[in-house]
Amino acid sequence: MFDFSFGELVVLAVIALLVVGPDKMPEMARTAGRWYGVLRRTLTGVRAEVEQQLLLDDLRREADKLRNLANEDLLAPTPAPQPSEEIPPPPSTSGESALPAIQSEGMAAPSATAPVEERLH
């Protein structure tokens, strides 16, 4: 905190001893120690309170951002569904196979035991 060397502290102690006197010196040291403790506790409390307020401010900002994003999503108009091309219905599952249709077009149906490369061609 303060940049005092040991020699400077000894000089200050000697000056305080000469000014206050040897009888009052222990009492003055205790009083200075008490004031130092009170000051230190006060500064620690203020620092903790400031850090807590900064944390709360950050949390409030984040909550506001999330609220704004949620409101934007809720208020944003949903696009109307676009007409799409006619999609053919899936093959019926009534037991009819699509293989006869393939064979009628002149293509050979792949066998189940053929290698994968042959089935893809």
Image (cartoon, helix red, strand yellow):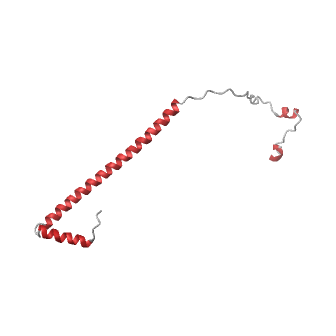
Point out residue 43 in the picture as x, y percentages from the top left corner: 28, 54
Residue 6 x, y percent position in the rendering: 26, 72
Which residue does the image show at 22% across and 72% down from the upper left? 10
Residue 104 place in picture, x, y as percent: 88, 32
Asked where in the image residue 120 lies, by quadrant, the reply is top right
> Between residues 64 and 115, which one lies in front from this camera angle?
64
Q: Is residue 120 left or right of residue 62?
A: right
Q: Residue at x 51, y 30 (%)?
A: 75
Q: Is residue 104 above or below residue 25?
A: above
- 78 lies above or below 37: above
Q: In what quadrant of the picture does the C terminus appear?
A: top right
Number of numbered markers: 0
Q: Residue furthest right?
A: 106
Q: Residue at x 14, y 64 (%)?
A: 27
Corner quadrant of residue 87: top right
Residue 25 drawn above or below residue 108: below
Residue visible at 20% across and 69% down in the picture: 12
Pick whichever, 90 or 71, lies toward us.
71
Instruction: Please indicate whether residue 26 sits to the left or right of residue 97 in the image.
Output: left
Q: Quadrant of the N terminus?
A: bottom left
Is 115 on the left or on the right of 34, as rendered?
right
Q: Is residue 120 left or right of residue 56?
A: right
Give coordinates of residue 106: x percent, y percent.
89, 35
